[in-house]
Amino acid sequence: MAVTCKVCPNQCHISDNHFGICGVRGALDNKLHLPYHGILSATSVDPIEKKPLYHFHPGAGIYSVGFFGCSLSCPFCQNYRISKEFPRKPEGRKTRPESVAEAALKSGSFGIAYTYSEPIVHYEWVLECAKEAHARGLKNVLVTNGYINDEPAKELLAWMDAVNIDLKSFNESFYHDELGGSLRPVLDFIRLAADSVHTELTTLIIPGKNDSTAEINKAADFIAGIDKNIPWHLSAYYPAYKYSIRPTGHEEILKLVDTAGEKLNFVFAGNIGGRSDTYCPSCGSLLIKRSGYSTIVSGIAGGRCTGCGSDAADFNIIIDGAT
Ligand code: SF4
């Protein structure tokens, strides 16, 4: 008899002593088996900009935890050693959620980020840890491919404060043929997240795969239809895992940033060292200056733009000390 996992749209039917597509959720004695529960691949304090989140406590450090496994099979995965090619026998100590929350508190971070590989496939552990974090006054940040079913999504988002969701393309066949998934549930999750928590999006731009002006325009229209203040990070791809396609050129990224910037207030270039500052959509004043991971909030005082007095919260910019 197979066990059905309902966390993500793959809805794997898992036979005894086997794993689902993510490689970490299995079946044993006809029950769901989670041998990777609490097995972390990494912990580190990172700049929040590394997630990337540009408008959620800019300049702050966040205690980050990583896992193993992933529900999608991106052939260009930049973290494939922990998402796909990890030991199929869990190794290492199981970490309790309360230990991570305590460590985050001690580190002086304002919160915990669930990141590096796909946190959703460790849904139960992330939920437990998020509750421990809130109990200590810490924020929770989910960095995810957004591939999750509606019910667990709602339960998880209830404990999150911010998310960065990968929008890997705006093309259903790309999701199906290259990633082994589907675009529609990701779009549903983006809508749901943007309705309840601070949301930013990331797209890794891959030459010839997801970089047409038409596709970027369609995606920008979708995002603007939700909220034109959602930050969108268009990042340069580098060859990794199964892809040997050339890296994305700087000029190509900048052109797409300009294209999307005609519809959205905040479009940033990623991985190219530039076009990463935040300007006030009302008066054009520089609000947040970024250089690498150094961030200076120079144009916001008392939560308002120093140029025109606009409330930063009206643009979904959450600075330290604000909620
Ligand atoms: S979380 Fe893993 S086991 Fe569950 S449905 Fe998704 S891929 Fe399958």
Image: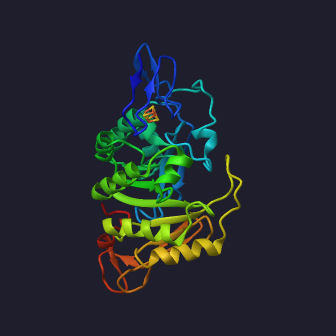
Quarter occupied by residue 219: bottom left
Tell me: residue 28, above or below residue 123: above
What colour scheme was applied to this rendering of the protein?
rainbow
**Image check: 165 left or right of 249?**
left
Q: Residue furthest top?
A: 29
Question: Which residue is located at x 64 percent, y 72 percent?
Answer: 250
The quadrant in which the C terminus is found is bottom left
Q: Position of residue 253 (x, y in %)?
A: 59, 71
Tell me: residue 300, above or below residue 107: below
Q: Is residue 16 visible?
A: yes
Give the tally of numbered discs. Answer: 0
Q: Position of residue 165 (x, y in %)?
A: 44, 54
Q: Position of residue 23 (x, y in %)?
A: 53, 31
The residue nearer to you, when weighing 101 against 36, is 36
Tell me: residue 320, above or below residue 16: below
Question: Which residue is located at x 43 percent, y 68 percent?
Answer: 218
The residue nearer to you, when weighing 90 against 121, is 121
Location of ligand 1 given as a quarter of the image: top left
Q: Position of residue 122 (x, y in %)?
A: 44, 35
Q: Is residue 288 visible?
A: no
Question: Which residue is located at x 29 percent, y 40 percent?
Answer: 151
The quadrant in which the N terminus is found is top left
**Image check: 304 left or right of 272?**
left
Question: Which residue is located at x 64 percent, y 36 percent?
Answer: 85
**Image check: 76 left or right of 116?**
right
